[in-house]
Each structure stands twice: as C-alpha cells, then as structure tokens.
Amino acid sequence: MTYRNGPATPAAPPAPVIESGSESRDVKTHMIDIAEQMFAERGLDGVSMRDVASAAGQRNNSAVQYHFGSRDGLIVEVLRRRMGAIHADRLVRLHEADESGLGADVPTLVSVLLEPFVEAIRRSPQPTHYGRFLAKVGPLVGPTIPEITERRTPPDDVVTRLIDALDHVPKRTAFERIDLAMQMFIGALAVHEDRQDSAPPVEIADFERTVVHLYDMTLAGLLAPDSTSTGDRRA
C-alpha cells in the first residue's frame, strides 16, 4: 500500500494509564515498596519491570518504565528513598558528636556510621526488607546515588573521620576493615529480617540484643591489631 505523504510512521505503543497528582505519587511509592521487597527476596537479577508492575497491581507493564525510566532507575529510587534519610540522620549525629567533643572518638563514629541503618529498620511499624535489599543490591549501586555523593564533603564523611581515628593501623587497612564491618553489619540485619519473616519466626536474639552484639563485634574488629603486614593469622 502507498501513502500520499510517504511511508506511514509505526504507531507508538500506548502510554500507561497513570493517575495524576497524589494518586500518581501513591502509585510510585507503592511500586518502590513492592520493588524493595522483591529485590530483597529474589536478588538483583531475579526481578523484572514486568514483575514489579504486576505485583503492584499495574495492568500496563510499562508503568515502571513510565515512572522510573528503567529497572536501574527503580533500584536507585529504592536506595534513594531511605539513603537520603539515613544520610541526613548521620549528619545530625555527627554534629551532635562534634558538639560533645567526640567527633574523633572511634565508638562514637561507629555509632554515627551504623545507627541510622538500625533506625531505618527499628522505627518501621511493619516487617522490613531493607536490610536484605541492601545486602543483595546496595553494594553494587549505592555509591552512584547522586544526592549522597555530590553533597559529601570531608568533614561530613564519617568514613574519612573513622579512617583517621583508627591510627593504630595503616589507612588502607582501616578502610578495608570499615568496608568489611559494614558488610557484616548489614548482612546480619538481613539475616535477622529473614528469621523474623520465617514461619514460625526464628529468634536467637531479639533485635536490640542483636544490634548490641553487632556493635561490640564491629568495634572489636576495627580496634584489633593489624596482622596483614606480618602474615599473622592466629586465632
């Protein structure tokens, strides 16, 4: 078939039917909630945009793309929602530590670094998935969150301060230990969430007791002598 004005342009796929205003925000928030849980349970490679849209009750599979652009955009939004609040909480705690003269104190800096993660789980009225989400997804994309990395300055960077405060070991060792400590801390919170979500729940230690154990273990690990240069691996 020929056309008077040239070849026909292929029809664009129909746009998703998305409500406007507060209803649109509710749809977007709901999809973020659903995505956090699904990524936490299945991992980064186990969830598609179609899965999220379907679980969120969106009949049009392009709803996630409409709101977030891509699956990676959705992952960043899940991280951004909580990490923005975590970062703000950390800055408040750091200011309070400075006001108390504890801005270079190792136990205080450990608390400033990690307690905002605990609070994000502690204050939730519903069972959370954020520890599991971070354990599976956060290490891969967390450093790319613009609102965190662009505003960070050395006096506000708790990790930089903690590296300086751990002056009994080389800075490289301090950085590696802090990275491992955060992985251990978040991983243990993820295990706690899994156990609470099981049927029946498995409780070796309640949440607050678990957190105390984690702080004690983290602090002990950071303050331990450095064996990397001597090859000493004694228990």
Image (spheres, helix red, strand yellow):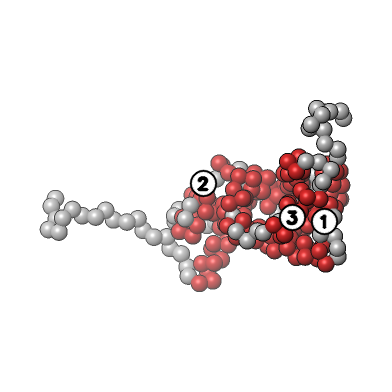
For disc 3, the marked residue is 158
Q: Judging from the image, what secondary structure is the residue with disc 1 in?
A: loop
Image quadrant in which you'd find residue 149: bottom right
Query: Which mark is nearer the camera, 3 or 2?
Result: 3
Q: Residue at x 43, y 63 (%)?
A: 17
Tag 1 and tag 2, C-beta contact below 8 Å? no
Viewer can see residue 34: no
Q: CA distance from mark 1 to mark 3?
A: 10 Å
Q: Quadrant of the C terminus?
A: top right
The amino acid pointed to by label 1 is Ala
Q: Earlier in the sequence, mark 3 or mark 2?
A: 2
Q: Residues within 10 Å of mark 2 (few under 14, many from 20)?
A: some
Quadrant in the rendering for residue 157: bottom right
Q: Check disc 3 and give the amino acid type.
A: Val
Q: Is residue 182 visible?
A: yes
What kind of element bears circle 2?
loop
- Going from the N terminus, do you reach mark 1 or mark 3 first? 1
Disc assigned to residue 48: 2
Amino acid type assigned to the residue bearing label 2 in the image: Ser
Give percent across and percent down for residue 144: 58, 51
Q: Position of residue 188 (x, y in %)?
A: 76, 44
Residue assigned mark 1: 104
Between 78 and 173, the one lying in front of the other is 173
Q: CA distance from mark 1 to mark 2?
A: 44 Å
Q: Position of residue 33 (x, y in %)?
A: 61, 57
Residue neighbourhood size for the residue with mark 1, other residues' Cα within 10 Å, grouped as few (<14), some (14–19), many (≥20)? some
Residue in the picture at 84% in, 52% down: 106
Cα distance between the residues tagged 3 and 2: 35 Å
Give the structural element (helix, strand or loop) at label 3.
Answer: helix
Snapshot quadrant of residue 230: top right
